[in-house]
Image (cartoon, rainbow, N blue to C red):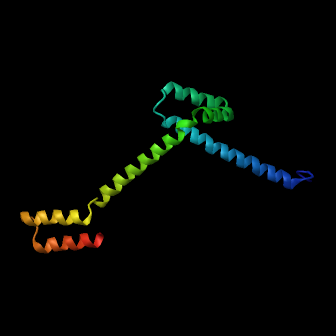
Amino acid sequence: MILATTEYPLLEIFWTILVFFAFIVWLMILFTVLGDIFRRHDVSGLTKVLWIIVIILLPYLGTFVYLITQHTGMSERAQRQQKSVEDEFGKYVRSVGGGLDPTEKIAKAHELLDRGAINQAEFDQIKRQALAEG
């Protein structure tokens, strides 16, 4: 019993791979467009809903029409989003890491030493740690 009888099975395999690849590319474009729709602050909620309805009812055509008509701000919005994420990450790292360079740490330790909050040995230890980190 032969399941598939074709004259060019290699071409059918190639065609299947090509179609699958095109579908994956379209999915990537679809998610990019949906992300851009939700990221936009310059349009109303009704406009966003209408674009989503168009994309649901006419998936390929709706996605490509959005790309053609709304392409001007997509890269700027993506860059702003990336910058925002980088800034938030930088704030988090600074908050966790202390955010002070060695000179600031030494200056604060010197202020504490002048006020009598720490002794000379503690100041020297803080100074060594600050210089080792820097």
- Quadrant in the picture for residue 34: top right
Tell me what residue is drawn at x 60 percent, y 32 percent.
69
Q: Which residue is farthest top? A: 46
Q: Residue at x 46, y 44 (%)?
A: 81
Across and down, in percent, residue 79 comes to: 48, 45
x, y percent for residue 77: 49, 40
The image shows residue 20, relative to residue 112, as above or below, that is above
Q: Nearer the viewer, residue 17 or 33?
A: 33
Task: Say which quadrant the C terminus sits in.
Answer: bottom left
Residue 83 x %, y %: 43, 47
Q: Specify whether 13 is left or right of 75.
A: right
The total number of labels drawn is 0
Q: Quadrant of residue 126?
A: bottom left
Q: Is residue 78 left or right of residue 90?
A: right
Closer to us: 80 or 37: 80
Give x and y (percent) for residue 31: 58, 41
Q: Is residue 20 left or right of residue 77?
A: right
Query: Vertical placement of 76 versus 122: above or below?
Result: above
